[in-house]
Image (cartoon, helix red, strand yellow):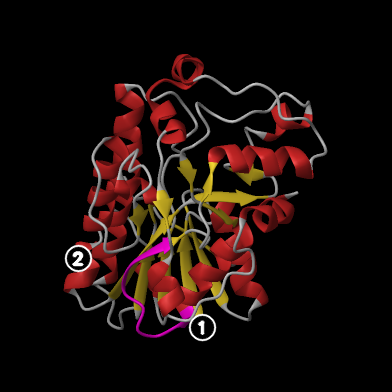
Amino acid sequence: MRVAVAGSSGFVGSALVAGLESAGHEVVRLVRHAPAAANEARWDPEQGVVPLARLTDVEAVVHLGGVNVGSHRWTRRFKRQLHHSRIRSTTVLASALTGLSVRPRVFVCASAMGYYGPDRGRELLDEESGPGDGFLAGLCQDWEHAAQPARAADIAVCHPRFGLVIGPGGGALKPLLPLFRLGLGGHFGNGEQFWSPVSLHDTVRALRFLVEQHGCVGPYNVTAPEPVSNGEFSRVLAAELHRPRLLPVPGFALQIAIGQASSELLGSLRVVPTRLSEAGFEFEHPEVRAIIRSAL
């Protein structure tokens, strides 16, 4: 199968390209710099430029692009960048696909569990659950809506709503490891809030599943089937590193350190991958210990 991937140099994107190629698929990497390899094609979403000639006979397109949510404090300017980087690129790519003489079968466009809001307590959240409120919820709704041109052209559109992706060298675990390795790690706030992690390995497998399986359409929560409290997550992480788990990180300290983004760490999202499971997908790392071990 010929698959185009935008956002192919990111944490998830680079792993996905490797996973697709190892499975025998031909990958076209949509990049924003001058192509440096035969499998790269330059696109420029700001200028509305998409290399349609390189997308001939592409059966699936995966879009993972967007400024990293955790890379800066959430100033007004940065939130505009987060929004624009996702909505503009998705709109441009989805619209361009409709101009192909032979359109791709499926457009897999990233989203996130932030769709459900910053804090839903102990409520079990699947794909039938309504959207939440707050900045990320609004961003995710706009992000998914931006793929509408592809839907209108009868391209199957899937939205993987990623949880906290945990993997070697990056993702949600990266900022935690230095403290925990020094024996200074602890839970956030009261530690009772639910986190919904997923291993990078299973994230790539889930994306491949959405690309390869005919009939997949709509939102899919890409989270392990067993959400865990932040307190339990920190306990398992400390144990796997053979380090003590010390004092918790107070909520006010997080607010001072990272600003509004702290709501995403202190809030509770108990998300389950109902639609993936119903479609026959099986997680190789279904619970927190397996997820952390896969990253370490």
Residue 18 image position (x, y, % from top left): 64, 66
Foreground: 201 or 271?
A: 271
Q: Residue furthest left?
A: 152
Q: How many marks?
A: 2
Q: Residue at x 34, y 34 (%)?
A: 81
Q: Is residue 207 left or right of residue 129?
A: right
Q: Residue at x 28, y 48 (%)?
A: 87
Q: Secondary structure at mark 2?
A: helix
Residue 17 image position (x, y, % from top left): 59, 65
Range drawn in magenta = 212-221
Amino acid type for the residue under numbered disc 1:
Met
Q: Is residue 130 magenta?
A: no
Q: Is residue 113 visible?
A: yes
- Height in image: 219 above or below 232? below
Amino acid type for the residue under numbered disc 2:
Pro
Q: Secondary structure at mark 1?
A: loop
Q: Are marks 1 and 2 in contact (CB under 8 Å)?
A: no
Kindly report the distance in space between the C-alpha atoms of the residues bearing marks 1 and 2: 23 Å
Residue 83 image position (x, y, % from top left): 30, 39
Residue 71 image position (x, y, % from top left): 50, 31
| Callout 1 crowding tier (Cα within 10 Å): few <14, some 14–19, many ≥20 | some
Q: Residue at x 48, y 64 (%)?
A: 5
Q: Residue at x 67, y 39 (%)?
A: 235
Q: Is residue 10 visible?
A: no
> Would you identify the image quadrant in which residue 271 lies?
bottom left
Foreground: 197 or 125?
A: 125
Pointer 1: what residue? Answer: 1
| Callout 2 crowding tier (Cα within 10 Å): few <14, some 14–19, many ≥20 | many
Q: Is residue 271 left or right of residue 136?
A: right
Sequence-wise first label, 1 or 2: 1
Pointer 2: what residue? Answer: 149
Please give the label number shown on residue 123: none
